[in-house]
Amino acid sequence: MAGKNHPGNPKVRILIGIVLLLGASSSGYAAWQRFGPQSGKVAYRTVDTRRTNITSSITATGTIVPEEVIDVGAQVNGLIASFGTDADGKMVDYRSNVTAETVLARIDDTLYAATVSAAEASLAQAKAQVTVNQANVATAQAKLDQGRKDWARAQKLGPSRSLSQADYDAAQSAFEQAVAGLDQAKASVSLSEASVAVADAALKSAKQNLIYCTIKSPVKGVIIDRRVEIGQTVVSSLSAPSLFLLAKDLTKMLVLVQTNEADIGHVHPGDTVKFTVDAFPGTPFSGEVRKVRLNATQTQNVVTYTSEILTDNRSMKLLPYLTANVTFVIDHKEQVLAVPNAALRWSPRGHGKPGRETAGGGDGERKAGGETERKPGGEGDHKPGADGERKPGHEKKAGMSTLWILGPEGIRPERVRVGITDGTLTEVEAEGVHEGDQVVVDEATPGTPGTTASNPFAPKLQGGRR
C-alpha cells in the first residue's frame, strides 16, 4: 500500500496535477469575478458638439434631355433612296450638325413624279375644254341673234297668207331654243373652269407630295437619332413615322426629375440645384428649377411630380439621356452648432420616447463606476410647472427636442430648438449647450444581453460553446 501511494507513483502524480489544475482554475475564476467587468454599470458613448456648415437638401434622380427636341417624320410612303450631307460634307448620321433646309434623306419619287405629270396633263385638258366651251358660247350667241331676228319678222307678219302658222311657230321655237342654248354654253364654260381649278389643285398636291419625298431639317441643330436606313420602306398612316430626332440646341439641357409628393413643397422655380452624372463622377454640375409640372404620376401608390431643371451645357459634357443624381438645396447655414441626429433620438432607459421632456435637473445622478441613481423629481414625479415638463394633453413644441449632456456629475437633459439637418447632423440652439459639450448618442451596459462578458478560464465545449 505504501508503495502504491508513494509520490513517485505515476498515478499519484496524475492525481496531484489534476488537483493543482482545478485549484488554479478556481482561483483564476474568483479573480476574474472580482476584478473582471462589472455588470450593471452604464457606459455612455458621447460626441462633442461642434460648429460646422450644414446644407439641408433633397436628393432624387432625373434624366438629362435637350431643351427642345424635334421629331422629323415623313408625310409620304416610299423607299429611302439616299441620305443628305451635313455641314461637314459627310453623310447625315448620328451627331451630324445640320442647318435649316439641310437635306436629311430622299424617298424614291418615281411614282410621285408620274403623278405630277398626270396632273399637269389633266390641267392642260381642263384648260382646253374651257376654250372649247367659250367657242360654244360664241356659237350659241350667234344662233340667238338669228333666232331673235326671225322671231321679230314673224311677229310683224303674224299668221296670214304670207306666213303660215307653222312657220310662225317655228320662228318662235327657234328663238327660245337659241336663248336656252346660250345659257347652256355659258354653264359649260363655268363647269370647265371649275375642272381647271380641280386639276390645278391636283397638280399642286402632286407637286407637294413630290417635295415631301425630300426630307429637310426644319431648324439648325444636331442629329440625336437616325431611325431609318437606305432601302427601308416608310409607311405613313395615321401618324407620321419618325425618321430623325433633332436637338435644336445642346448648349442648354433640361434635367427632368421625378420628385416625391412629400418633397415637392420644397421645390420652387428659381431654386439652385446641384447634380452629378456617373459619366463624370468628379465633376459637379449646377442648374436652376425652371418649373414644376402639374401633371402628377402615380406608380404603386407613390405620387411624383416632374421638375424641370435648366442647366448650362456649353462645355458639351452632358449627353442626352444621362442619369443625373440631383440635390435640391433647401437651406444652407454657416458655422452653426450641430449634433449628430442620434443624439436627438437617444434618451436614458425609463424615459419613454427619445427626446421626451423631463423635469429640470435630469433623471438622476451618476455614481462612481458609471451607475445612475434615481432621485425624487425624476420620471413620474414631475411637479406642475416644472422646467421642460410635458404637461398632460399637450404635445411637444414643434422644432424642440432634448439632448442629454455628460458632465462631471452625470448626464443632464437640455431642451434645444432644432434647426436644419443634412441627414447626419442637425442644427441646435440652446443657452445651456455650448461648443465642445459631450452629448450622449448611445449607451453600453456590460452584463446585459448582447454585451455579456464570458469567463476566460471556463473550458470550451465542442462547436465553440462554453
Image: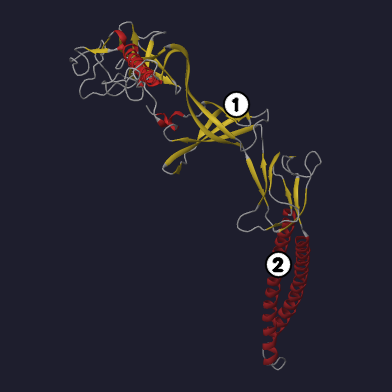
- The image shows residue 231 at horizontal and vertical percentages of 75, 56
Image quadrant assignment for residue 197:
bottom right
Left or right position of 77 against 260: right
Q: Are marks 2 and 1 in contact (CB under 8 Å)?
A: no
- Dot 1, crowdedness within 10 Å: few (<14), some or many (≥20)? some
- Amino acid residing under circle 2: Ser
Q: Secondary structure at mark 2?
A: helix
- The quadrant of the image that shows the C terminus is top left
Q: x, y (%) of residue 428?
A: 39, 15
Is residue 173 left or right of 398 when viewed as pictured?
A: right
2 vs 1, front mark: 1
Is the image coloured rainbow, by chain, by secondary structure, or in one colour? secondary structure
Closer to the N terminus: mark 2 or mark 1? 2
- Give 24 or 322, whichever is nearer the viewer: 24
| Cα gap from disc 2 to disc 1, whole angstroms | 65 Å
Of all residues, the one furthest to the top in this rendering is 408
Residue pictured at 44% horizontal, 24% vertical:
423
The answer to whether residue 358 is left or right of residue 107 is: left
- With respect to residue 61, does 460 lie above or below? above
Residue of label 1: 285
Q: How far from the left and from the top, in percent, is residue 126?
A: 75, 68
Task: Write the residue at 30% across / 18% down.
Answer: 348
Q: Is residue 148 above or below residue 422?
A: below
Residue of label 2: 195
Across the whole image, how many numbered discs are drawn on residues? Answer: 2
Q: Nearer the viewer, residue 159 or 109?
A: 109
Residue at the farthest bottom position? 161
